[in-house]
Amino acid sequence: MVIALNRVHAGDLFVLRNSLVAFLFLAAAFAAGCDDGTGFDFRPILVDDTVIVAAPIPQTAGLPTALDITSDGFGGVYGGRFPERPRDALEWDFLVRIEDGEIVLVPGVAAGIPTSRSAITPPIEGETFESLRETPGQSTFRSDTAIAMVEGAVYAARSRASTGSGCNQFAKMEPLRVDVENGILEIQLVTNQLCGDLRLVPLD
C-alpha cells in the first residue's frame, strides 16, 4: 500500500484531497438532521473568520495579496494566498489591489482568469453583517470589475469553482479595517461551506 501511494503524482493527491473534502461536506449535510420528521433538512454549515490581506506594495512585502473565501473544512476559511506564484494561480478568489486611491477586491475574471467564477456584490444597502441572511440575486454579483472596500459596509461573495468538487461557496463579508496608506485590509467573513447554498445565517 505504501509503495502504491508513493507512485501517486502530487497533482492527483491534490484532486483526491479536494474530492474528499467535498464528500465530507455532503456527508455533513446529510448528518445535519431532519425537520420534525418530514425529511432531511440541509442546514447551512457556516464558518466564520477574520483575515488580514494586503495590496502588493513595498511596505506589505511578505503579506498575502489575495483572498480565498472558501471553507477549510475545519471551522475557518483559507484566507490569504500569494497569487503572484504560478502554483497559486487557481487557489484564490479575489486579488487585493489599490486603484484610484481605494483598496479593491478583483475577481478572477477581472484579473485575467476567464474560467474563474468568483464574484462579489457592491456594498449592500440597508443590511448589516448580522442582518444579511442570504445572498442577493446573482445578477447583483460582479465578476468582471474590481469592487472598492468600504469600512463597515456589507458585501456578498461567490467563490471560484473548487478543484475536485466543482462547487461554489457563498459568503458575506465586512471590512473591519481599510488602511489605504499601508495597503492593509482586515475583513470579517462568514462562509456557507455547502455547495451552492445561499443562506448566511443558521436556521431559526
Image: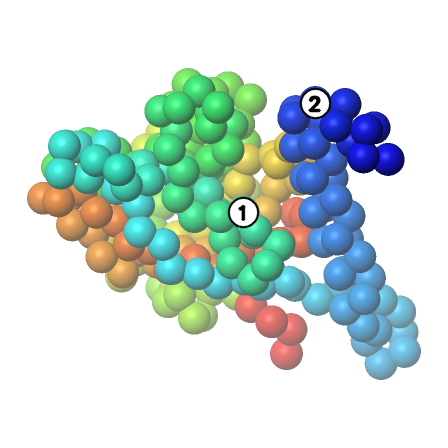
* Marks 2/1: CA–CA distance: 25 Å
Please rate how many residues cluster around mark 1, counting C-alpha atoms within 10 Å: few if below 14, some from 14 to 19, many from 20. many
Q: Is residue 77 left or right of residue 127?
A: right
> Which residue corresponds to mark 2?
9
> Which residue corresponds to mark 1?
70
Please rate how many residues cluster around mark 2, counting C-alpha atoms within 10 Å: few if below 14, some from 14 to 19, many from 20. few
Residue drawn 70% across and 32% down? 13
Residue drawn 52% across and 43% down? 158
Instruction: Tell me the amino acid under the disc marked 1.
Output: Thr
* Quarter of the picture holding the C terminus: bottom right
Q: Which mark is residue 7?
A: none
Viewer-proximal residue, 12 or 199?
12
Viewer can see residue 154: no
Residue drawn 75% across and 53% down? 24
Q: Is residue 27 left or right of residue 169?
A: right
Instruction: Tell me the amino acid under the disc marked 2.
Output: His
Question: Which image quadrant is residue 174 in?
Answer: bottom left
Viewer-proximal residue, 177 or 75?
75
Nearer to us of marks 2 and 1 is 2
Q: Earlier in the sequence, mark 2 or mark 1?
A: 2
Q: How is the image coloured?
A: rainbow
Question: Which image quadrant is residue 187 in?
Answer: bottom left
Question: Which image quadrant is residue 7 in?
Answer: top right
Q: Are marks 2 and 1 in contact (CB under 8 Å)?
A: no
Helix, strand or loop for disc 1:
strand
Q: Position of residue 46 (x, y in %)?
A: 58, 63
Viewer-proximal residue, 135 or 93?
93
Residue drawn 47% across and 35% down? 92
Q: Is residue 152 left or right of residue 13?
A: left
Helix, strand or loop for disc 2:
loop
- Give the vertical position of 157 relative to 8 (above or below): below
Q: Position of residue 33 (x, y in %)?
A: 81, 72
